[in-house]
Image (spheres, rainbow, N blue to C red):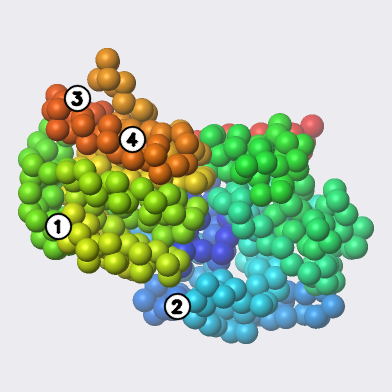
């Protein structure tokens, strides 16, 4: 039986993106559609989303969104399509909430009305179903921004003619961000102050939207099996580990897929030469290309390590900074692309100026350059403190660029550690988040590069043949949708 599925989120590629959430919301619906389901997506119409570029059309009528003590608020709705599909995307246009630069903040300063902005998105997504006469079997919410939806479905929308019979699935892409706001948000949510309890949305005498979503969703998922286990511990649960343990029977991990139409060395238009596992010769040309672009010596015989990352503590950038002087003592090159905390910009930029023959740093993000680094590097370094899923390690494997990762979350799930006896594995892993462990593992990889060419060839082949597909992930989501529906009926 085909399902009607409403997916609602704060971002989706190609329209708006700040992280992996957008990749999931832009990719998963296409593969659910291939399984025969009627899938609709709802996101805000941010100021940055060009209506003409994406051929958005204005729907007739005005969407009325009840906002508790604020009263009714109104917005226009535009309709577009996920590229290369027939999947509708509905954009809620409210200039007061979304007609501004930035999705959640400007210059790392969060908008003071983020609570109202995303309660509006959550309620607006449900109200939209009446406007377009859509009756979803499943409402799939994502992260704290739409985590109010399971609570709303269990309370004020329980008897709603369009969404009252829907089950809810909440996907957690990052536990660190929970949507914690003053208790006065209860009056805007309108679900009744009886929900403001330890077993509801209350945490530290504030409204915690993610907590409310976890308690109320029929099914909870996160973006890897490893992360699903980790967030039930104090080290990774960010204060909600107890809540997740309570819901452990309803908590599942599904590893994200990769869009191999974009990330494939055989067809990548961003790289100087295409190559494949059967004909890998072009990779050496890609290496020389990125060395030239980065201003490093063009040296085929020296291993090149790539880093494409946000320069923040979650990504282990502080650990990398501590290890960097020791890494630069090795016979290697490093090229870094990313932006984040100001100290990291100054530190890594300064070290690059001191060691121009070994380290190149580009502050910012450039999609073309990220493709060139994935294709041209020999290794890809991801020393994350925690990583719900991670995508760059998956991209790297597809390009024969061996990941060096900390064994956490999705990194641990997706990378198989090098087995020296059997020449098995797809990369190199370390467990301790310490400069010493990072240095030792990079040293292990570099030793393998210089002294075990046969092992390097086998690892590259293993990595390039590994696949993480949205076909597999979408089937797992479909099973959980049906599990939630069957439980509700029982």
Q: Earlier in the sequence, mark 4 or mark 2?
A: 2
Q: Which mark is residue 455?
A: 3
The quadrant of the rendering that contains the C terminus is top right
Does residue 217 appear anywhere in the picture? no
Q: Which residue is mark 1?
A: 357
The quadrant of the rendering that contains the N terminus is top right
Q: Determine the secondary structure under disc 1.
A: loop
Q: Say if 453 sits above or below 36 in the image.
A: above
Q: How much space separates mark 2 and mark 3, taking CA atoms?
A: 47 Å
Q: Nearer the viewer, residue 468 or 414?
A: 414
**Left or right for 66, reference 134:** right
Q: Earlier in the sequence, mark 2 or mark 1?
A: 2
Give the image quarter of residue 441: top left
Position of residue 125 measured from the top left corner of the image (x, y, whole percent): 65, 64
Q: How much space separates mark 1 and mark 3, taking CA atoms?
A: 27 Å
Q: Say if 63 sits above or below 206 in the image.
A: below
Which residue is painted at 69% across and 81% down in the image?
74
Callout 1 crowding tier (Cα within 10 Å): few <14, some 14–19, many ≥20: some
Q: Earlier in the sequence, mark 4 or mark 1?
A: 1
Position of residue 352 measured from the top left corner of the image (x, y, whole percent): 24, 62
Does residue 439 appear anywhere in the picture? yes
Q: Earlier in the sequence, mark 1 or mark 3?
A: 1
Q: How much space separates mark 2 and mark 1, taking CA atoms?
A: 39 Å
Contact, CB < 8 Å: mark 1 with mark 3?
no
Q: Which mark is residue 441?
A: 4
Q: Determine the secondary structure under disc 2.
A: loop
Position of residue 481 measured from the top left corner of the image (x, y, whole percent): 62, 40
**Left or right for 149, reference 3:** right
Which residue is painted at 55% across and 57% down in the image?
40
Q: Which residue is mark 2?
A: 48
Contact, CB < 8 Å: mark 2 with mark 3?
no
Q: Nearer the viewer, residue 442 or 275?
A: 442
């Amino acid at each position: 039986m085909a399902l009607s599925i409403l997916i609602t989120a704060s971002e989706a590629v190609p329209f708006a993106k700040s992280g992996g959430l957008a990749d999931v919301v832009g990719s998963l619906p296409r593969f659910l559609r291939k399984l025969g389901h009627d899938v609709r997506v709802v996101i805000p119409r941010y100021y940055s989303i060009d209506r003409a570029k994406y051929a958005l059309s204005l729907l007739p009528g005005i969407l009325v969104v009840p906002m508790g003590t604020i009263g009714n608020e109104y917005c226009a709705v535009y309709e577009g399509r996920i590229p290369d599909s027939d999947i509708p995307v509905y954009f809620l246009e409210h200039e007061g909430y979304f007609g501004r630069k930035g999705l959640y903040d400007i210059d790392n300063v969060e908008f003071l009305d983020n609570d109202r902005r995303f309660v509006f998105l959550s309620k607006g997504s449900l109200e939209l179903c009446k406007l377009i006469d859509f009756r979803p079997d499943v409402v799939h919410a994502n992260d704290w921004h739409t985590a109010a939806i399971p609570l709303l479905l269990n309370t004020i929308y329980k008897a709603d003619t369009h969404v009252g019979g829907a089950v809810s699935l909440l996907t957690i892409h990052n536990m660190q961000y929970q949507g914690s706001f003053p208790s006065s948000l209860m009056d805007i949510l309108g679900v009744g102050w009886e929900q403001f309890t330890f077993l509801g949305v209350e945490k530290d005498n504030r409204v915690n939207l993610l907590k409310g979503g976890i308690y109320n969703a029929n099914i909870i998922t996160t973006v890897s099996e490893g992360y699903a286990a980790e967030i039930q511990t104090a080290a990774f649960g960010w204060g909600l580990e107890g809540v997740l343990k309570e819901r452990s029977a309803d908590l599942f991990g599904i590893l994200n897929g990769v869009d191999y139409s974009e990330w494939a060395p055989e067809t990548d238009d961003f790289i100087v030469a295409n190559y494949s596992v059967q004909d890998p010769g072009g990779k050496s040309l890609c290496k020389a290309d990125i060395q030239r672009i980065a201003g490093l010596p063009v040296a085929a015989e020296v291993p090149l390590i790539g880093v494409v990352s946000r320069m923040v503590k979650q990504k282990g950038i502080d650990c990398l900074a501590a290890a960097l002087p020791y890494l630069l003592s090795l016979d290697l090159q490093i090229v870094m692309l990313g932006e984040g905390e100001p100290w990291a910009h100054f530190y890594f930029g300064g070290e690059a100026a001191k060691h121009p023959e070994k380290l190149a740093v580009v502050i910012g993000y450039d999609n073309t350059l990220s493709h060139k680094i994935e294709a041209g590097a020999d290794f890809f370094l991801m020393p994350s403190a925690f990583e719900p899923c991670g995508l760059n390690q998956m991209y790297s494997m597809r390009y024969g660029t061996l990941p060096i990762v900390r064994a956490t979350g999705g990194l641990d799930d997706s990378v198989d550690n090098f087995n020296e006896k059997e020449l098995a594995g797809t990369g190199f892993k370390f467990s301790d988040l310490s400069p010493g462990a990072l240095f030792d593992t990079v040293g292990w990889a570099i030793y393998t590069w210089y002294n075990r060419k046969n092992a390097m060839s086998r690892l590259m082949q293993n990595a390039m043949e590994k696949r993480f597909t949205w076909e597999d992930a979408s089937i797992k989501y479909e099973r959980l949708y049906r599990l939630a529906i069957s439980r509700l009926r029982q």
